[in-house]
Image (spheres, grey):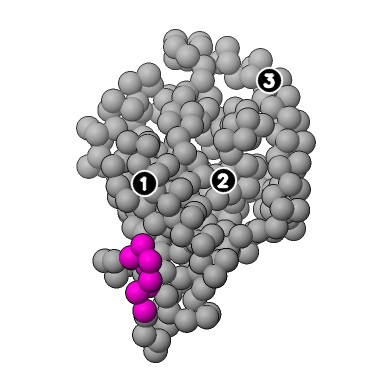
Amino acid sequence: MLLSRITRSKSTRVARAVSKSGLGMTVQTALPGTLPESRSATTGQNGWSSAGEDSVHHRVTTTGEVAFIAPPRSIAYSATKRVIDLTLGVLGLAATLVIGLVVAPWIKIKSPGPVLFRQERLGEHGKPFTCLKFRTMDLDAEARKQDLAHLNEAQGPVFKITHDPRHIPSLRWLRKFSIDEMPQFWNVVRGDMSLVGPRPPIPGEVASYSPRQLGRLTVKPGMTCTWQVNGRSDVDFEQWVEMDLDYIERRSTLLDLTLIVKTIPAVLSGRGAS
């Protein structure tokens, strides 16, 4: 009964948060898994259906689509995660300021305009926030995105072009080694993001998510996760979602620390960067 109340409460919060972000959609999120075909589902409150004890986090929407709710984690895990975020986040922010002494002038020389790129992203439960990056694209990159839609190489609600014409050639190395994402340590320190968690999506992408894919929004987004250490752009969107949902289901302090350590060689190798 308690878990049922938690599940309904979290679903409501996600729906309200995403609605406030301007997507104009009803959201019900969840964790990975499928409903056992041998079980008959019974309809519950809020249009959910349940499929038995082993599907306690599994729910079916009124349209018959499977969705999931992230299983709760202990206060100790949440507190430890925040301490790690603050500790490593402050160190990362200090490193960003030092590297910025070289990167900022380089960006200014190669492309007059702001050094930082600011973009609205959606965080935990669909809460919008401003995500920071070192700018590596032309100033009109966002405006040109629609014109380049026919060149999109990615499947699903994501946008990727291997040789994106909006990229500033002499700044590609910032993306290759993820240096462009270092300003996000500020987002981590602020609490918008965590060091480990699904990458924060843009509202336009989330608008076309399925109920299952919306499960990515049940936890705080991060700078790295399973996707980052397993190929990044070499992984298609469906695999990416499954990796994120698997992380959400298994998340722990040990897993977070393991992914942080694995991120270092993954970033240095530049594998899967685009």
Residue placed at 62% from the left, 42% from the top? 194
Residue 111 spot, x, y in % from top left: 44, 14
Tell me if residue 234 can be seen.
no
Residue 215 spot, x, y in % from top left: 46, 57
- The local secondary structure at tag 2 comes to loop
- The local secondary structure at tag 3 comes to helix
Question: Which residue was labeled with disc 3?
Answer: 97
Circle 3 Cα neighbour tier, 10 Å, few/some/many (<14 / 14–19 / ≥20) = some
Residue placed at 73% from the left, 24% from the top? 94
**Which residue type carries mark 3?**
Leu
Given residues 189 and 233, the one toward you in this image is: 189
Mark 3 or mark 2, which is nearer the start of the sequence? 3
Mark 1 or mark 2, which is nearer the start of the sequence? 1
In this view, 227 is above or below 21:
below
Mark 1 or mark 3, which is nearer the start of the sequence? 3
> Which quadrant of the figure contains the N terminus?
bottom right
User: Label 2, label 1: how many angstroms apart (C-alpha)?
Assistant: 15 Å
Query: Mark 2 and 3 residues: CB-CB less than 8 Å, in contact?
Result: no
Question: Which residue was labeled with disc 1?
Answer: 206
Tell me if residue 63 can be seen.
yes
